[in-house]
């Protein structure tokens, strides 16, 4: 199965249309401290927590499987895996942000710091 993916331009358009668009950031907290997304409604649920709690630990606003949801990480690999899991579990409008926050930093003027 192919993971539903969007590029940064599409992501920004989605945010223009819906400034309260839910974004699920699956990076670890130390990564979020280095570079945070200053737009959208961002929820953090690190992949390390997924391994312990599974989907039951998702923040409450993300439990509605019919609402649009963008999943992101640093470069897009972890978020692709998370997107696939969510899609297979019934989330209807979940997409992976291709290239993650690093691509957002490169392609926008949001002043997001890059890190290794």
Image (cartoon, helix red, strand yellow):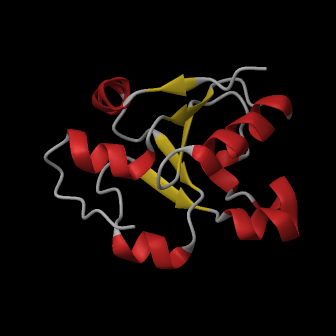
- The image quadrant that residue 71 belongs to is top right
Residue at 69% across, 27% down: 66
Residue at 64% across, 51% down: 78
- The image quadrant that residue 68 belongs to is top right
Residue 61, x across and y down, in percent: 63, 50
Res. 90 in view:
no
Q: How many marks?
A: 0
With 39 as the anchor, is 90 left or right in this view? right
Residue at 63% across, 25% down: 93
With 108 as the anchor, is 80 left or right in this view? right
Q: Residue furthest left?
A: 109
Q: Quadrant of the N terminus?
A: top right
Determine whether 116 is above or below 70 in the image: below
- The image quadrant that residue 13 belongs to is top left
Residue 22, x across and y down, in percent: 50, 43
Q: Quadrant of the C terminus?
A: bottom left
Determine whether 82 is above or below 56 in the image: above
With 101 as the anchor, is 78 left or right in this view? right
Q: Residue furthest front?
A: 116
With 14 as the anchor, is 1 left or right in this view? right
Res. 93 in view:
yes
Residue 31, x across and y down, in percent: 46, 72
Residue at 73% across, 57% down: 58
Residue 73, x across and y down, in percent: 52, 53
């Amino acid at each position: 199965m192919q993971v539903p993916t969007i590029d940064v331009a599409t992501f920004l358009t989605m945010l223009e249309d819906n400034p309260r668009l839910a974004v699920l950031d699956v990076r670890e907290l130390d990564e979020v401290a280095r570079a945070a997304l200053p737009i959208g409604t961002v929820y953090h649920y690190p992949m390390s927590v997924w391994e312990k709690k599974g989907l039951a630990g998702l923040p409450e606003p993300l439990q509605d499987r019919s609402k649009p949801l963008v999943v992101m990480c640093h470069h897009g690999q972890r978020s692709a895996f998370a997107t696939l899991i969510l899609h297979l579990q019934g989330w209807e409008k979940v997409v992976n942000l291709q290239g993650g926050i690093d691509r957002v930093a490169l392609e926008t003027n949001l002043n997001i710091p890059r890190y290794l």
